[in-house]
Image: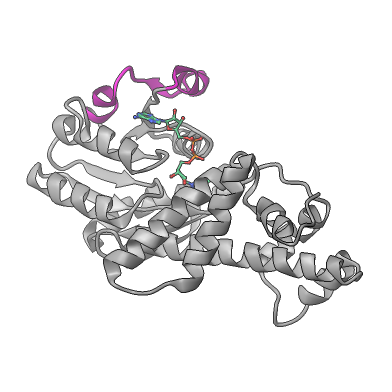
Amino acid sequence: MTTVGFVGLGIMGAPMASHLLAAGHRVVGFDVHRPAVDRLAATGLVPADRVADAARSADIVITMLPDHPQVEQVAFGADGILATARPGTLFIDMSTIRPETSVAVARAAADQGIQVLDAPVSGGEVGAKQATLSIMVGGGEPDVAAARPLFELLGRTVVHVGGHGAGQVVKAANQLVVAGILALVSEAIVLLEGSGVDAKAGLDVLAGGLAANRVLELKRESMVAREFRPGFRIDLHHKDMGIVLAAGRQAGVALPVAGLVAQLVAAGRAMGHGGLDHSALLTVVEQLSGRAT
Ligand code: NAD
């Protein structure tokens, strides 16, 4: 049995912490939103009032937070993980954040004798609930090996992709490809409908040929029906496209299509669709053709 400190018990963190509890681990949980802690306390989670209470007694601390400012606060705060966890603790950040923050946290933690992994996930709320996440891990091999039994309680695909920050770079690439495909599927729908061709029939054919992809497989019906209940919100994808562009700048590479897709996602947010599923990019593409629904 491992004592796991878990910080960030939201849409993703709550089911992930539940899997660790179900496997018999002691989980000490903290979230700034107290009801999130209380819900899991009913199923065996040890409630913590502060980050320090989750970190101090832990063998492994996991964070699942919205973005890099929250990770920095929880890691570097006076009451945070680096200040309060014991030397030898493994700190695994599973949030999606910019790679440079993962590298900075790992460097600072090493000075305290704390090892760090960045381990963002793909698979969404369903993947978190069903423990079928894909987990992309950056950091040192011995730490990945130590964390693997926990990762295998949370996901099906666990890949060590490189050193600190590499997990976040892979996640950024994942988010770029997903947003890009969503934009192209949206354009395909606008083209089909604008030409008087049945979009459902058209996309069914696409899904069986070289254009087949998971977005078409999972989302084509809801997109044609204009059902945009999240899912993965445009607000979060907007954050992720910012990470993609910043990572590209950091790497000194040009990502022209990423720039365009990032602007479409930003437009969706500016139009007030931040709370809708990212497939609502269709609405943005439609408006460009004066075909608002
Ligand atoms: P969420 O907003 O539901 O959960 C985040 C939780 O962190 C909230 O409960 C919030 O109260 C808590 N929190 C915020 N600041 C805190 C702080 N300083 N200390 C303690 N708790 C704090 O978000 P989510 O959907 O669970 O996403 C978490 C991360 O996982 C994000 O980086 C997101 O991009 C990524 N992600 C989400 C999905 C998805 O489908 N939702 C899929 C893959 C990856």
Q: Which residues are magenta?
A: 33-56
Relative depth, front residue between 269 and 140: 269
Indicate left or right for 89 with 232 as reference. left
Residue at the far left in the pictured view: 111
Indicate left or right for 182 with 60 as reference. right
Residue at the far bottom in the pictured view: 210
Q: Give how far across and how far down residue 282 sits, in percent.
A: 70, 56
Relative depth, front residue between 111 and 198: 198
Q: Quadrant of residue 5?
A: top left
Residue depicted at 83% across the width and 52% down the height: 225
Q: Give how far across and how far down residue 244 sits, in percent.
A: 41, 61
Within the magenta stretch, is there residue 37? yes
Residue depicted at 70% across the width and 74% down the height: 212
Q: Give how far across and how far down residue 284 sits, in percent.
A: 67, 54
166 relative to 3, above or below: below
Residue depicted at 77% across the width and 57% down the height: 290
Q: Give how far across and how far down residue 289 sits, in percent.
A: 74, 62
Colour setting: one colour
Q: Quadrant of residue 198?
A: bottom right
Residue at the far front in the pictured view: 290
Within the magenta stretch, is there residue 2? no
Question: Disc count in the image?
Answer: 0
Q: Quadrant of residue 264?
A: bottom right
Quarter in which the N terminus is drawn: top left
Residue 281 visible in the picture: yes
3 relative to 131, above or below: above
Q: Quadrant of ligand 1?
A: top left
Residue 2 visible in the picture: no
Indicate left or right for 157 with 282 as reference. left
Relative depth, front residue between 223 and 4: 223
